[in-house]
Every structure is written in C-alpha cells, then in structure tokens.
Amino acid sequence: MTDDLLARAEALDAADPLAHLRDHFITPDGFDVVSYLDGNSLGRPLRETARLLDDFVREQWAGRLIRGWTEGWMQWPLELGDRLGTVALGAAPGQVVVADSTTVLLYKMSRAAVDARPGRRKIVLDTDNFPTDRYVLEGIAAERGLSLVWIETDPAGGITAEQVADVVDEDTALVLFSHVAYRSGWIAPAAEINRIAHAAGALTLWDLSHSVGSVDLHLDDWGADLAVGCTYKYLNGGPGAPAFAYLRRGLQGELRQPIQGWMGHRASFEMGPGHEPAEGVRALLSGTPPILAMVPLHANLDMLAQAGIEAVRAKSTLLTGYVLELADRWLAPLGVQVAGPRDAAHRGGHVTLQHPAFERLLATLWENGVLPDFRNPNGIRIGPAPLSTSFVEVHRGLTMLRTLLEKQP
C-alpha cells in the first residue's frame, strides 16, 4: 500500500524554502543516525563552525595571542549579544550579552531582580519548570529570606495568564517562567503575563532556552524585563555553549547583579579598589568571557539571519504538525498519547509523546539511529530542528518507533 504520509513528507521537503540549509551541517563518514529528533536538546554542528574554529585556533589564537583581546575579543559578549537580539530575540541593541552558563545567568538576574524590589517577599514560579530554574530560585529564597509562590501547572500544558493573575500581588518581587515549557512545548502568553506582573509592580524573568532559534520572540514589544537562554539547542552552539542574558534598557543602572567580577567593572584594566559597575548591559559580565566557546555562534547567527526567524518558525510549525499527523495515524492506536498543545499558536518546537514502554525502548531507538530524548515519567520529546531536519527524516524516525511499539508484548 502506498504510504501517503511518506508522499506528504516528500512534498513538504520539495516545497521547503530552507531545505538547502541542511547541506551546511556536518555529516561524518560512517554517520549512523537515520533520524535526529533531539534538536531541542543539542543542535548539530555546521561545516562553517568547524572552519571558524580551525581558523580561530590557527590564526587568531596562535597568531595574535594576547593581542586578540584588544583586537576584538573583549567586545564579543556585547557584539554577539546585539546580533542575537536582532536576529532571534526582538531586542534592540545594548540589551543582550553572551556569557556564563544558563544557571549562572539565572542566578545573577534573579538575585538582581529581587534586590531591586526591596520589601517585597514573594517570588512566583511554576511546579513544572525546568529543574535548574526551580533550584536556583529555591536557593535565592533561602538566601534572601523570601517566600516561593508555586503555581501548579499541567505537565501536558503550561502556565496561563489567569493563573498568574490569581497570585501576583503588591508583595511579589519577581515572576519567572519558561516561555516554552521544556516538557510539553507549551508557549506561555508572555506579553499578557508581563502586563499582569507590571501592574502589581513586579519584575518578569523569562527562560528562553526552548524558544530561541525556533520560535519568533519579541522581547521589547512584549515588555519583558529580563530573560536568559542557552545557545546549544536550536542555535547549534555546541555542548555547554555560553548562554545569554537580556536586560531591558530602562532597568540598566537600577539592577545590580551579585557576581561582581573584573569584566563587569567600569574600567576592567584599572584594577582599582572597590567594584564600580560598567554602564549598560556590560555590567552583567563577571569573569573572562568564554571566547573559544563563542566561535560557533558567529556561524549559526549568520545562518539564522539568512533563513529569517519567521521562516524558521513557519517550518517548525509544519514539522511539529507533521509529527502530530504521524502520532495520530500510527501511534495513537498503539496507546501513545500526545502530552502537549495541538494548537500551533501554543506549540513550541517539540512534541511530547507518552507511552509506558518508552523508557525501555529508548536504548533500542538509539541503537537503530533514531535519537529522541526521554523525560520522566513516560514521555519522549520529538524535537525536529527547522534548519537541519527534513520531513522525510521525521517519517523515518517515527516509522522505527511504530515498529518497536508493534513488537511490544
């Protein structure tokens, strides 16, 4: 019987305006992956990334040595931040830096936010946010004598504006949520939540780790206060690539981050007594920037700028919609449930599927070259990356998943 879903995948690939970009990614000799479905966890490397890294080591690092700092490296955190803001975040220049890990930046921004609202005793967060976000806020609450206000969210959904409005009040210092929920893929109504928090005098902090490079963002237009996110998922920055932080221009100078290092000083090489924060978003820096780890971002921001975030989002929506088609046709009869939003307006870049057998099937999927990831209690996330994943590749991966499920006793 003709597989009409395969024909549909082939037609979608033929009409894909971003299809040619797949050739920009490295496919090693003997590549054993037939379907990479974990772009929402770790992106693939570009050929240009390998070239830039080799050039950096041989020419800039080896050739310029310490001169590289004054010839450009010192400005990379701000220059890459501005580029990221323009290409992916909807942020005007002078509001984004690239530095540190997501966890460190979450701590810096959260501590600065609660300290900027003295006398307010509450931080609002949700129970199903990524563990790091919850753990960091638990530590800050203990450190500063604050109370955490937990919002119970549906693991198959996410935070809503109504839930936030029910708990935010004049004693709230900060609200922190993920824009795209790591488990379900739910897109939070950021602009509306920002308005609710601001009406009560609270600040907002958004984790963009599962959004950036997959969902079009408009931080300035949404009235966001602070945001952080990683660069190793849809931005393909590599394992442990540095994160980024956004601080709204109107708050710069008011918020003071707690890790006072030399790179965030008004005059880094003055090395005098006492810390005097630099003007603007540079004050968010602490130690020496991870320059080598920033190299891949140059290549990936070039590609994202070429593609355009609107086109990336359009393809992401089609990819996840196609995953839902396959799940409904093939997997639902085998007991698989969709644990996330079906409406594209509320769906991020991945789809979570649930079945009791998924945990034990994951190793077999990986052995057969199909790579999703598993999240407790019984979910796998299908995260096709718009720049590197084809529709036929999604078809191959879910074909293998269906085959394994059909063999279950």
Image: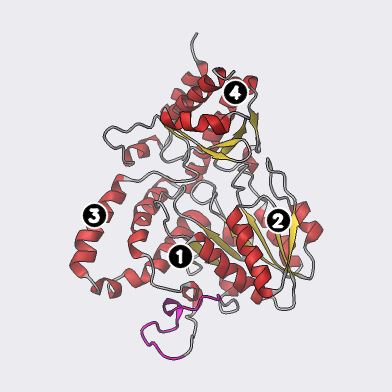
Residue bounds of the magenta highlight? 257-273
**Type of amino acid under label 1:** Asp
Q: Which residue is mark 4?
A: 331
Mark 3: give few (<14), some (14-19) or many (20+) Cα within 10 Å: few
Determine whether 143 is above or below 362 in the image: below
Return the disc, 1 or 4, that comes first in the chain's sequence: 1
Q: Which residue is mark 2?
A: 192
Dot 4 and dot 3 residues touching (CB under 8 Å):
no
Return the disc, 2 or 4, that comes first in the chain's sequence: 2
Mark 4: give few (<14), some (14-19) or many (20+) Cα within 10 Å: many
Question: In this image, 38 relative to 328: left or right?
Answer: left
| Residue 4: % across, % down | 51, 16
Give the Cα distance between marks 1 and 4: 41 Å
**Type of amino acid under label 4:** Leu
Determine whether 331 is above or below 215 in the image: above
**Type of amino acid under label 2:** Glu
Residue 263 among magenta residues = yes
**Type of amino acid under label 3:** Asp
Q: Quadrant of the C terminus?
A: top right
Identify the element where label 1 is drawn. Answer: loop
Dot 2 and dot 1 residues touching (CB under 8 Å):
no
Mark 2: give few (<14), some (14-19) or many (20+) Cα within 10 Å: some
Q: Is residue 321 visible?
A: no
